[in-house]
Image (spheres, grey):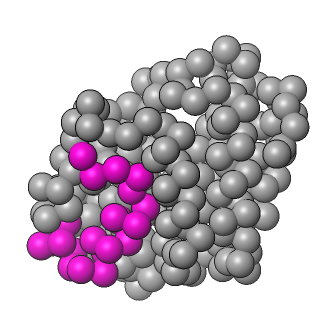
Amino acid sequence: MLTDRFSDALTYAERLHRAQTRKGNDIPYVAHLLAVAAVVLEWGGDEDTAIAALLHDAVEDQGGAETLAEITRRFGDRVAAMVVACSDSVTTSKQEKAPWAERKRKHLAKLAEAGPEVALISAADKLHNLGAMIRDVRRDGVETMRRFNASPADTVWYYASVGRALARYRAQAPVDEIEAATAELADLLGLEVP
């Protein structure tokens, strides 16, 4: 069962991301965090894993090491470790952030070594991202993919690679759904899944 820690994490995540919207639209970013936490809970994640799901982008998008220290203080080492494992960068400086492809390759290497909790959070995150892209491409056309840092082909490569990196957790995380959504996105974009 969830406790006041989850409520505190939800309030904290909403406050951190309050001014942030999903890339290229006006959907409040907290909608994504809620969706990821929901998938984690539906797949049997415990409270710490659900809290890490709410905070999975906090370090990367909202304060770097300072935010990580606050997460550790408020929610403990286990939650903080999951959040770091789900982050592809801990710097707050866009100039210091590695290029997209380099960050994604490093993240894929981390996912290949991830434990089941990080695999579940990452799978839930990627599944929600894929669903949003599919919805937007269907509704607004292929040009909606221009808002991302990667080409459509690189995006499909990345999500296919995530599915492969997490394949051993197929029974514990929505890996089949990631593979199906990646194939659907590729089809909508007129691409092959690598």
The number of discs equals 0
Where does the N terminus fall, quadrant-wise? bottom left
Residue at image location 52% in from the left, 75% down from the top: 114
Q: Is residue 69 left or right of residue 170?
A: left
Q: Is residue 83 left or right of residue 34?
A: left
Where does the C terminus fall, quadrant-wise? top right
Residue 84 belongs to the span the image colors magenta? yes
Residue 10 belongs to the span the image colors magenta? no
Could you tell me residue 50's position as x and y percent?
42, 71
Could you tell me residue 37's position as x and y percent?
47, 63
Could you tell me residue 35's position as x and y percent?
51, 54
Residue at image location 67% in from the left, 49% down from the top: 159
Q: Main secondary structure of the magenta part?
A: helix
What are the residue bounds of the magenta stretch? 71-91
Compared to residue 161, the image places residue 149 above or below, namely: above
Q: Is residue 120 visible?
A: no
Compared to residue 24, the image places residue 51 above or below, namely: below
Residue at image location 55% in from the left, 51% down from the top: 105
Q: Is residue 24 left or right of residue 94?
A: right
Residue at image location 49% in from the left, 72% down from the top: 118
Compared to residue 44, the image places residue 37 above or below, namely: above
Q: Is residue 20 left or right of residue 181?
A: left
Could you tell me residue 84's position as x and y percent?
34, 64
Q: Is residue 101 visible?
A: yes
Compared to residue 84, the image places residue 190 above or below, namely: above
